[in-house]
Amino acid sequence: MSMADFNTQVIAEFRENGGRVGGAFEGAPLILVHHVGARSGQERVTPLVYLADDGRYVIFASKAGAPDHPAWYHNLKANPETRVEVGDQTLQVVAEEATGAERDRLYSAQVQAMPQFGEYEEKTDRTIPVIVLTPRD
């Protein structure tokens, strides 16, 4: 199964079950991030694990420790005003990359919550970007 097919199945299950899914994501906090292609201009949706942080949603461009950033990272950098689906809600958000001590604090919190993120960091030479999604009023 391709990654696109896998994501399509996860998205459908998420929407059918109020944000809950089974399989690899069972029990993990999951968010659907809408993003517009930086080059294509096409809207895409990507299911991602998130960390809640004081009313914000934090996502990690780990790509499971791959040497390059995921496409959604580049898309959010180019088009930071977007929307997310959390549970059965759709929210307008602004995406901003965390840096310095805030980035390190958030990444450490994610490693504590889900240790495999520490493994992703060990597998790559790049610093894994941390993106904070802040809901707009």
Image: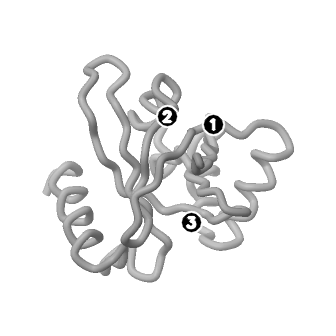
Q: Position of residue 108 (x, y in %)?
A: 75, 60
Element type at mark 3: helix
Can residue 68 be spotted in the picture? no
How far apart are the alpha carbons under marks 1 and 3? 24 Å
Mark 3 or 2: in front is 2
Q: Residue at x 48, y 62 (%)?
A: 49
Element type at mark 2: strand
Mark 2 or 1: in front is 2
Neighbours of disc 3 within 10 Å: few (<14), some (14-19), many (20+)? some
Residue 94 figure quarter: top right
- 104 or 34, which is in the foreground? 34
Residue designated by label 2: 81
Judged left or right of residue 111, residue 49 is left
Q: Position of residue 50 (x, y in %)?
A: 54, 61
Residue 1 figure quarter: bottom left
Q: Amino acid at mark 3?
A: Gln
Image: 101 above or below 23: above
Dot 2 or dot 1, earlier in sequence: 2
Dot 1 or dot 3, earlier in sequence: 1
Judged left or right of residue 136, residue 92 is left
How far apart are the alpha carbons under marks 3 and 2? 29 Å
Neighbours of disc 1 within 10 Å: few (<14), some (14-19), many (20+)? some
Q: Position of residue 83 (x, y in %)?
A: 43, 46
Q: Residue at x 44, y 65 (%)?
A: 86
Q: Amino acid at mark 2?
A: Glu
Mark 1 or 3: in front is 1
Residue designated by label 3: 116
How far apart are the alpha carbons under marks 2 and 1? 9 Å
The disc at residue 96 is 1
Dot 3 or dot 2, earlier in sequence: 2
Image: 133 above or below 73: below
Q: Residue at x 80, y 55 (%)?
A: 105
